[in-house]
Amino acid sequence: MHPTIADVLARPEVRAGAPAVRAGRAALGTPVRWVHVSEVADPAGTLPPGVLVLSVGVPVADPTTVPARYVDALRAAGAVGLVVEIGRQLPSLPAGLVQAARAAGFPLVELRRTVRFAEIVAGVLGQVAHRDDDPGPPGVEAVFRSLALHRVPPGRVVGELARRIDAPVVCEDLAHRVLLTAGGPDLRDWAARSRLAGPAGPEGWATAPVGRPGARWGRLAVPSRPTQGTADRVRALLDAAADAVSLLDPSPEGLLRSARDALVADLAVAVPSDAGRLAVRARAAGLDTGGPLSVVALRPAGDDAPGRAVDPEQAVDAALAVAAPGATVVSPAPGELVVLVPGDGGPLLAALPATVAAATAGPGPFAAVADLLRRARDDVAAHAATGGRGLVRVPALRGLVHRLGDDPALLGFAADVLGPVAALPAAAHGDARDTLWALVEAGGVVADVARRLGVGRPAAYARLRRLSGLLGLDLTDPEVRTALHLALLVDARAAR
């Protein structure tokens, strides 16, 4: 047997709201086949039969609502009772509503304390989700109950709805940014079209809100006009799917971040012919594609970098607030951060701490973002592969070494330049490499070499003289230092 209204009122999640029956006590034995949150005054076509309606009182508090008509509309739509939470939205039940419900013998219950409607819906649907003898609501709607109870990702609910109605489906937030899609919807000019959407709009969309009552964060939309004779079925399934997404209670911010992560991941492997389609997706996700963009790719600094325990994402957030408040942070792959910056990415690089290594490419038009992304990511990978230290901005030389990889000529060049150092005993070899790295990173300035090595200037001069003699090279010559820098980068990459 299905639970009755009395059974529902006896559930602990309902008792927590201190329920009081105000009308229709004689009908509390009516079976409940569905529980639905509804805040519309005319629910015609939006409710399955045998539904117990939950509300925070939005239609009741509306001064234009006629209580008797509201009760009649609920009954005509298939509702078996109404449960209203008393609170800020509705301090008390209007006498007219109580009188109308009593006259109709319609169960009316007030909850005197705040409860979570999602818990009530989940609890009741858990009793009926697996009943084989349930003739309604329509069998396919039970699928969404089960999906919610099994805590599937919201995207699966959206996909199941699109499959069941054989039409595209979109989940968007209150700013009309697309969070989830299924069925290949047309996202061109999405925000503008969505603002005009609805059954009476130019495209005849069906929509349903998602989120807890009083905390709506978006809606599901079927962005096409239902075919003849399917509108009621589409509406019932859409509401069932919206209930399921609401029960899952995802973070809209997390869904938006995931949508943008997926977009950038697709950009990373895009070909030029994909640019137009990806630009449409980007705009639908709330990104501005009209102006030039820079791409900044980031990773934690090497293990020898001071302060390496700092979370790079926290460091980026702090830098964004100062240098690039309009930028968008995404994570297209585990452990990777990418920032899309309107205009020049240089100020963001300057604001990042030494605990983060970063590379930038751009600015350029959105059509070039795929190439900019690959360049920036390659340069950060080069930083890792060539032993970059501290706050290194990954100059083009590192990227060149990384891309040339194991080229025999390059490896031979490094071996020729650093051969005398490689022949030293282990301890002396390490000291020599550290000194050479300090020299090239300091640009030949001996005072800076001493600071990097943690020694006095006389000791630094002595080390450099010994290395100059060992290598047979003039270390004050800029071309020699360039050759040493290239050789060190190749050697570091080969050692990893």
Image: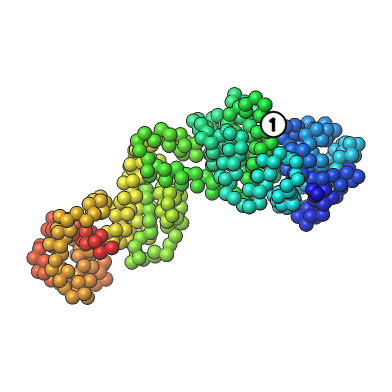
Quarter where residue 456 is shown? bottom left
Q: Position of residue 207 (x, y in %)?
A: 63, 34
Element on which disc 1 rests: helix
Q: What residue is at 88 percent from the left and 44 percent from the top?
A: 27
The reply to whether residue 480 is in sight is yes
Q: Quadrant of the C terminus?
A: bottom left
Q: Position of residue 299 (x, y in %)?
A: 38, 56
Q: Looking at the image, which is closer to me, 262 or 387?
A: 262
Q: Is residue 157 above or below residue 302?
A: above
Q: Looking at the image, which is closer to me, 428 or 247?
A: 247
Describe residue 469's horizontal placement relative to residue 125 as left or right: left
Instruction: Indicate how the structure is coloured in the image.
Output: rainbow
Quarter where residue 426 is shown? bottom left
Quarter where residue 365 is shown? top left
Q: Looking at the image, which is closer to me, 494 or 393?
A: 494
Q: What residue is at 26 percent from the left and 66 percent from the top?
A: 452
Give the amino acid at mark 1.
Asp
Q: Is residue 25 above or below residue 384?
A: above
